[in-house]
Image: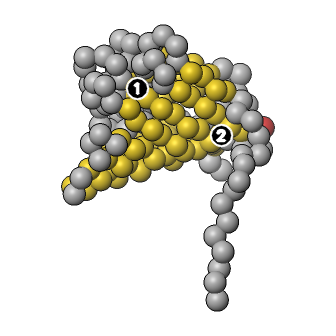
Amino acid sequence: MVIPILYPTAIPFPPIADLLIATATTSVTINGLDGKAHGGYDFEIYFRNDTATATAYAMYANNDTTATNYTRQELRARGVDIAIGGSTTDAFLIGTPLEPGNTYKATGSIGISSDGRLISTHMFGLIAAQQFSLCTWSKNTVVTDLTSIIITSTVVNGIGVNSRFRLWRKI
């Protein structure tokens, strides 16, 4: 018996945010979200680092930029090496900084769990380093909604020109 694998041919909603970075910046904010009404969000992010320094990227929710209010877990494959890591005191989306001149692609989703925790699961790909990461990110405190997302770089202007942030509602 052959069981067909069906892939969606289109995303049912247009993106509610589609930001293409024209000038390098240190942070990007998406306001006006209603995560509860929208059932969470799917996202696609391209990070481009045009600085001379490796940078990491953090994600904050609801204007809470206190890094210790977040947790990250990660399974990373780089070349032939596999590593597991994480932190209970940072909001980084991925544990590996992006080297100068490179690009990450991240796809994933973010939403509110049944116990009121904000959780994101996402995948990162870095072609130049042959790296693939599966990550979870969560807010350590209970929330009633997701109203904003802030993405920041640890390096000034670490979100380079042509970085892109796209966000779709789930319902």
Disc 2 secondary structure class? strand
9 to 18, vertically: above or below: below
In this rendering, the count of numbered labels is 2
In percent of width and height, residue 54 lies at: 26, 25
Q: CA distance from mark 1 to mark 2?
A: 22 Å
Query: Residue 61 versus residue 115: which sits nearer the camera?
Result: 61
Q: Quadrant of the C terminus?
A: top right
Left or right of 38, for residue 31: left
Please tell me whether mark 1 or mark 2 is closer to you in this view: 1
Q: Is residue 150 visible?
A: yes
Tell me if mark 1 has few (under 14), some (14-19) or many (20+) residues whose alpha carbon lies within 10 angstroms of its own: many
Secondary element under disc 1, as helix, strand or loop, is strand
Q: Is residue 85 visible?
A: no
Q: How is the image coloured?
A: secondary structure
Say which mark, if any, is on residue 48.
1
Q: Which amino acid, mark 1?
A: Arg
Q: Residue at x 72, y 49 (%)?
A: 10
The residue pinned by badge 2 equals: 41
Q: Is residue 114 left or right of residue 84?
A: right
Residue 25 - label: none
Quadrant assignment for the N terminus = bottom right
Q: Left or right: where does residue 168 sit relative to residue 68?
A: right
Which residue corresponds to the image point at 44% horizontal and 13% vertical from the top-left?
Answer: 24
Quarter occupied by residue 20: top right
